[in-house]
Image (cartoon, rainbow, N blue to C red):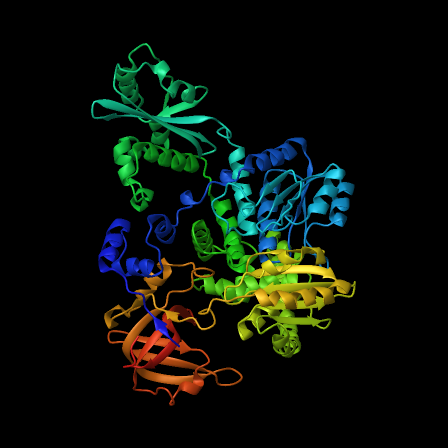
């Protein structure tokens, strides 16, 4: 295996460390990962919810909020319809809790058993019979064009809250909130379904405030040589909608000849330090022009009196976000920043409810393999922090069953011990069990539900073993038929709930995309597609949409259903399609990328602090990989429950002895290395908790005797 450590400029490292207020080691890791711009570094070094994107950046968000508030006002019955996976389960839970908190009569529904993905006409009919007039889909709906039209015929509005890639035609819904829809207005295309639902929830809470939809203008006047710069921002729902700057020499330009009159008309105008601002406006325009403004410093004094004493110049220099800007922050930008911060604090926009909700948002982002870039990093950081502080009802019971209480919970713990268990409910056809767990108020009932979910997960594991025995040889044989670029498995003996697991595992095994199709008793075929080597698998169903009853998903994971009589011609087309599949030539055996090579005096437990700084790890941001040279193997033993496969090692690193695990490496001991050897290693970090004690642990990715170089 090749090791790769990118060369970086030490001068750039020093500059970044100084600008961002981080250690040179942290700065060097950022730079090696290609994160040099402040706008990117910001989301790796900060975790304040103040800096997540405003939900009203969605161009349709006001429409969604207004429609839901209308339902509240009129006492309408609302149905939330979700998906059966972790993302759908958590999205239903978050939105249901929020709507019922508002007193809106709300029910929820999710596909169970062998019911197909997405909104169904049956669900619409049932909601109509119940007197319902509004349906909100979460983590689905963007491909339900016919069903949304059917609902409209019955006088039922539909709000689609989804994050899946849309097809060419969109449903004619009342409102669509989907970051992947062209011109959605939202800057983050990698939200999960639950995160998108949470954005609606936060917007809905803002919609209850007096400030909702208010036309507000922030005005600032500052001297510039012999002139004054008069600058202003329009903001609605804390979103900047327009900006203007006029540089005026006093007495030279009448107010009527500037653009300010039209810009300020009809606005509620705030300034910082009213007395000073009015004096400067008088210098610019004389006494004949009156300005009716409010002093935002007075509002600030109620929440943060120490800040109210400062000038805008001083405030902008204190801004945390300002140090990540490549250009200096203006006084007006500083004013807007403090305005947003104080409005959010005054209304407790992210309180205890938010902490409970963000735990589920974090689960969804990790389970659905969303890119851990931008604001997603803050959402997951905050969710993990809330889980570690006080796991919410339902999640706490699962953590107890999985032996996680008392441990520091990171992304690996969620990915290995929590999300697969929740997903098992959907795979076994009973996803409603997980929603009931999260919503149940009675602790004893929650405990019973958690036991049932753990049992489903064990059943899912057994199905996985059986399914793998069926799928692996079929997939291997299919390689030649599909030009060694795709594996295809078709069987009536594979449970539909594990097609995604199997296709993912096959993609890992054969290093090519994988398709697993289950033949159903009702004459349909249900399939899952998973990517390998960076190939965009959604392009396959997109090429042949006429074959499918439904299809959708993401670039690297997709699902579909079709009638079995169409399966043979579809697979013939797939054979032809594989001729066009191309992989990156380096994708099959990528090198081990080293984030930092560490001298021995850095190999102490404090290294975990650096590791934790860069959490969360996952899609688009794998765990940090460190390298160390010349560390001595002090002890080694073979471990494995059923058969010895793995190594437990102890390294003498000078000031500290590290324990380490090396998976699938038992056969290397006394062949490639032995106790007493000095070795070079590439490793990640984890925590090993046993009997209440937690120690840092290396997880070896590769190692070799010292002297071969990195």
What is the total number of numbered labels drawn onto the structure image?
0
Image position of 388 (left or right of 317): right
* Spot occupied by residue 378 in the image (x, y as percentages of width and height): 43, 51
Pick the front one: 480 or 697: 480
Quadrant for the N terminus in the image: bottom left
In this picture, is 707 found above or below 77? below
Image position of 143 (left or right of 344): right
* Spot occupied by residue 569 in the image (x, y as percentages of width and height): 72, 65
Task: Tell me which residue sits at (26%, 31%) in the image.
Answer: 311
* Spot occupied by residue 298 in the image (x, y as percentages of width and height): 35, 26
Can see residue 213? yes
Q: Residue furthest left?
A: 225
In this picture, is 523 found above or below 342? below
- The quarter of the picture where residue 565 lies is bottom right
Can see residue 498? no
Quadrant for the C terminus in the image: bottom left
- The quarter of the picture where residue 107 lies is top right
* Spot occupied by residue 351 in the image (x, y as percentages of width and height): 47, 43
Pick the front one: 421 or 82: 82
In this picture, is 268 found above or below 600? above
Pick the front one: 391 or 294: 294
Image position of 408 (left or right of 360): left
In this picture, is 37 found above or below 337? below
Q: Residue furthest bottom?
A: 670
Q: Residue furthest top?
A: 288
């Amino acid at each position: 295996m090749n090791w790769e450590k990118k060369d970086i400029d030490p001068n750039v490292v020093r500059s970044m460390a100084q600008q961002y207020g981080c250690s040179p080691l942290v700065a060097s890791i950022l730079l090696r990962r290609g994160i040099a711009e402040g706008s990117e570094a910001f989301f790796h070094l900060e975790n304040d919810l103040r800096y997540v994107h405003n939900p009203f950046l969605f161009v349709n968000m006001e429409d969604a909020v207004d429609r839901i508030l209308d339902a509240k006002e009129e006492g309408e019955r609302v149905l939330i319809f979700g998906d059966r996976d972790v993302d759908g389960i958590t999205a239903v839970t978050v939105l249901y809790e929020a709507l019922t908190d508002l007193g809106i009569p709300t029910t929820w529904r999710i596909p169970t058993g062998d019911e197909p993905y997405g909104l169904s006409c049956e669900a619409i009919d049932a909601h109509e019979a119940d007197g319902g007039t509004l349906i909100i889909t979460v983590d689905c709906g963007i491909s339900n064009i016919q069903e949304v039209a059917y609902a409209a015929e019955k006088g039922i509005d539909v709000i689609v809250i989804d994050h899946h890639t849309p097809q060419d035609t969109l449903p004619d819904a009342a409102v669509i909130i989907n970051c992947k829809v062209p011109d959605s207005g939202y800057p983050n295309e990698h939200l999960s379904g639950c995160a998108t639902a949470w954005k609606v929830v936060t917007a809905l809470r803002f919609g209850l405030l007096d400030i909702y939809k208010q036309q507000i203008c922030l005005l600032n006047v500052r001297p510039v040589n012999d002139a004054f710069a008069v600058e202003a921002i329009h903001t609605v729902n804390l979103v900047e909608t327009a900006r203007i700057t006029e540089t005026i020499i006093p007495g030279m330009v009448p107010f009527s000849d500037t653009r300010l009159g039209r810009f300020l008309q009809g606005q509620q105008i705030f300034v910082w330090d009213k007395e000073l601002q009015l004096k400067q406006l008088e210098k610019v325009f004389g006494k004949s022009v009156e300005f009716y403004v409010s002093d935002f410093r007075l509002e600030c004094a109620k929440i943060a009196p120490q800040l109210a004493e400062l000038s805008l110049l001083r405030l902008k220099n204190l801004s945390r976000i300002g140090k990540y800007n490549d250009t200096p922050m203006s006084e007006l930008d500083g004013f807007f920043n403090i305005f947003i911060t104080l409005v959010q604090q005054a209304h407790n926009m992210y309180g205890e409810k938010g902490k409970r909700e963000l735990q589920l948002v974090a689960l969804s982002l990790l389970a659905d393999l969303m890119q851990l870039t931008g604001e997603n990093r803050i959402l997951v950081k905050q969710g993990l922090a809330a889980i570690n502080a006080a796991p919410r009802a339902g999640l706490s019971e699962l953590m107890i069953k999985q032996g996680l209480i008392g441990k520091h919970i990171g992304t690996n713990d969620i990915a290995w011990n929590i999300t697969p268990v929740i997903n098992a409910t959907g795979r076994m056809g009973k996803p409603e069990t997980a929603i009931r767990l999260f919503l149940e108020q009675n602790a004893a009932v929650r405990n019973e539900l958690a036991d049932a979910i753990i049992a489903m997960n064990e059943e899912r594991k057994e199905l996985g073993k059986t399914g793998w025995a069926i799928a692996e040889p079929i997939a291997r044989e299919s390689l030649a038929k599909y030009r060694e670029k795709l594996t295809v498995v078709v069987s009536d003996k594979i449970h539909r709930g594990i097609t995604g697991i199997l296709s993912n595992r096959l993609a890992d095994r054969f290093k090519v995309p994988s398709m697993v199709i289950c033949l159903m008793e009702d004459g349909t075929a249900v399939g899952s597609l998973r990517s390998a080597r960076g190939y965009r698998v959604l392009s396959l169903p997109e090429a042949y949409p006429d074959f499918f009853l439904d299809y959708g998903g993401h670039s690297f994971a997709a699902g579909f259903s079709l009638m079995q009589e169409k399966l043979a011609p579809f697979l013939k087309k797939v054979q032809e399609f594989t001729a066009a599949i191309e992989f990156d030539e380096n994708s099959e055996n990528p090198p081990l990328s080293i984030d930092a090579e560490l001298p021995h005096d850095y190999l102490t437990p404090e290294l975990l602090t650096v590791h934790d700084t860069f959490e969360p790890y996952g899609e688009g941001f794998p765990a940090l990989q460190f390298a160390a040279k010349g560390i001595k193997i002090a002890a080694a033993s073979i471990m494995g429950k059923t058969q010895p496969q793995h190594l437990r090692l102890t390294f003498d690193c000078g000031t500290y002895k590290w324990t380490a695990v090396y998976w699938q490496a038992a056969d290397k001991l006394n062949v490639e290395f032995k106790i007493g050897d000095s070795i070079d290693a590439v490793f990640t970090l984890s925590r090993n908790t046993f009997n209440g004690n937690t120690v840092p642990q290396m997880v070896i990715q590769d190692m070799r005797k010292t002297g071969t170089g990195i």
